């Protein structure tokens, strides 16, 4: 779980550098990583960090934990959908 609720919005240049860093270290991440964000723009930036299916972005803790531990009843929305992505 990456709790990014307090992370600042980054410029496109910084966001691209962060994406490169995540891509380089992707093999070091656990098989599943949930990123928890607080705003729609944070959601969009976090979603661009990786397109790996084992990494998803959420704006609420409960669905993130359900997905992370495989206990979700309905699929929690990922970076391609949900309230935060639509906002």
Image (spheres, rainbow, N blue to C red):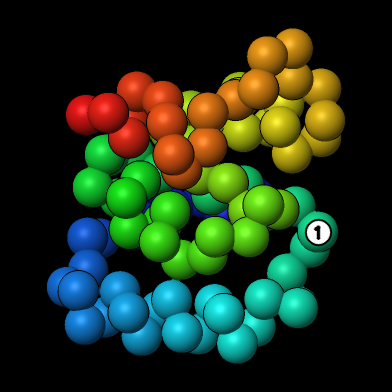
Camera sees residue 11: yes
Q: Is residue 38 left or right of residue 79?
A: left
Quarter holding residue 72 = top right
Q: Position of residue 10 (x, y in %)?
A: 22, 68
Classify the position of the C terminus by image quarter. Answer: top left
Q: Is residue 47 left or right of residue 10?
A: right
Taking the spot 60% from the left edge, 25% from the top edge, the residue there is 76
Taking the spot 42% from the left edge, 31% from the top edge, the residue there is 81
Taking the spot 27% from the left edge, 28% from the top edge, the residue there is 86
Mark 1 element type? loop
- The residue that mark 1 highlights is 31
Disc 1: CA contacts within 10 A as few (<14), some (14-19) or many (>=20): few
Taking the spot 74% from the left edge, 12% from the top edge, the residue there is 73
Task: Give the residue furthest to the left.
Answer: 11
Q: Position of residue 6 (x, y in %)?
A: 34, 51
Task: Give the residue furthest to the top.
Answer: 73
Q: Position of residue 44 (x, y in %)?
A: 32, 50
């Amino acid at each position: 779980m990456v709790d990014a609720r307090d992370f600042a919005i980054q410029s496109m240049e910084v966001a691209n550098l962060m994406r490169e860093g995540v891509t380089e270290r992707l093999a070091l991440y656990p098989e599943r990583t949930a990123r928890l964000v607080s705003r729609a723009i944070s959601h969009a930036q976090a979603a661009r960090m990786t397109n790996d299916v084992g990494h998803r972005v959420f704006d609420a803790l409960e669905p993130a934990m359900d997905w992370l531990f495989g206990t979700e009843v309905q699929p929690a929305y990922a970076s391609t959908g949900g309230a935060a992505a639509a906002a």
